[in-house]
Image (cartoon, grey):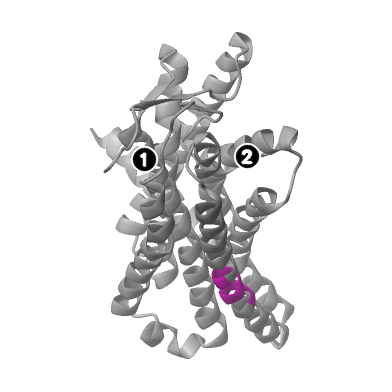
Amino acid sequence: MRNHTRITTFILLGLTDDPKLQVLVFLFLLVTYTLSVTGNLTIISLTLVSSQLKSAMYFFLQNFAFLEISFTTVCIPRFLYSMSTGDKTITYNACASQLFFIILFGATEFFLLATMSYDRYVAICKPLHYVTIMSSNVCRRLILFCWAGGLLIITPPLCLGLSLEFCDSNVIDHFLCDASPILKISCSDTWFIEQMVIACAVLTAIMTLVCIVLSYIYIIKTILKFPSAQQRKKAFSTCSSHMIVVSITYGSCIFVYIKPSAKDEVAINKGVSMLTTSIAPMLNPFIYTLRNQQVKQALNDSIKRIVFLLKKY
């Protein structure tokens, strides 16, 4: 990794300088991070041990939970450490690594959400061929495609970003190393890389959103043809969790690409980052658990087995 300047560390300003608010933010993030990791690890464990959760849908859900843990872990523990110790510095290499993994996990998540919508399309529109189409080999290849797509889409802007110079300021007005505030403090000409970042982000969002919208158009058309209301309700319930997560993910992107005033831009950026790095990863396990009968049943069975073993010993 090349660094063309004397600056080898950055200072992350965080969310607030108010000591009382810092305590509240610390406790809030600690709770949300703990719940996020616990909830997503629970989903991963259930999909590994439960015989009821062996379809392609739960394989993708397992990978989604792993992505959520990875994404929030890249962002939140470093900020919690900063607030607890007062050390706001971060090295150039650590900042670059954090930025790389934030964008990689974020881009991969978009591709995975599109893949999960295709899985729901096959399950509802082609149920008799579901097992054949969504075989184990196909699922593994789709997951590999998600990671490869995420890596390919972020490589061009990140390669250009490694040549940025930082001359006058090393203060990042954020609680993590995000692209926008980093570009603002660079003394290099950042116009081209800014356009590339926007182009890659919009391309990823549009490509995956088109896949999701097309999948759900066919899904809704198929469901509406079902003869019984019970069948329609059951079919919609299998998609509802995914639709809620998609709405949260893409909804947060809207605030990134609107054009706020300069005064509000930093606050909006921090707010969206807070949503995507701490709140959304915490909510997703609850969304999938509370709205999915098979996951709820598998969780109840696992709890009963654990209670039985504890009583036995």
The quadrant of the picture occupied by the N terminus is top left
For residue 269, the mark is 2
Q: Position of residue 264 (x, y in %)?
A: 73, 35
> What residue span does the magenta drawing correspond to?
207-213
> As drawn, is 244 to the left or to the right of 259?
left
The quadrant of the picture occupied by the C terminus is top left
Residue lying at 65% horizontally and 34% vertically, measured from the top left: 266
Q: Position of residue 66 (x, y in %)?
A: 38, 51
Between the C-alphas of marks 1 and 2, the distance is 19 Å
Q: Can residue 53 be seen by looking at this rendering?
A: no
Amino acid type, residue under disc 2 in the picture: Asn
Q: Main secondary structure of the magenta part?
A: helix
Rendered position, 196 above or below 129:
above
Residue 13 is inside the magenta segment: no
Q: Quadrant of residue 10?
A: top left
Hey, which residue is sitting farthest right in the picture?
A: 261
Is residue 235 or residue 186 the one in the foreground? 186
Amino acid type, residue under disc 1 in the picture: Ala
Q: Position of residue 81 (x, y in %)?
A: 40, 21
Within 10 Å of disc 2 (Cα), the crowding (few <14, some 14-19, many 20+) is many
Rendered position, 30 above or below 62:
above
Q: Which residue is mark 1?
A: 96
Q: Secondary structure at mark 2?
A: helix
Is residue 54 or residue 36 the one in the foreground? 36
Hey, which residue is sitting farthest top in the picture?
A: 19
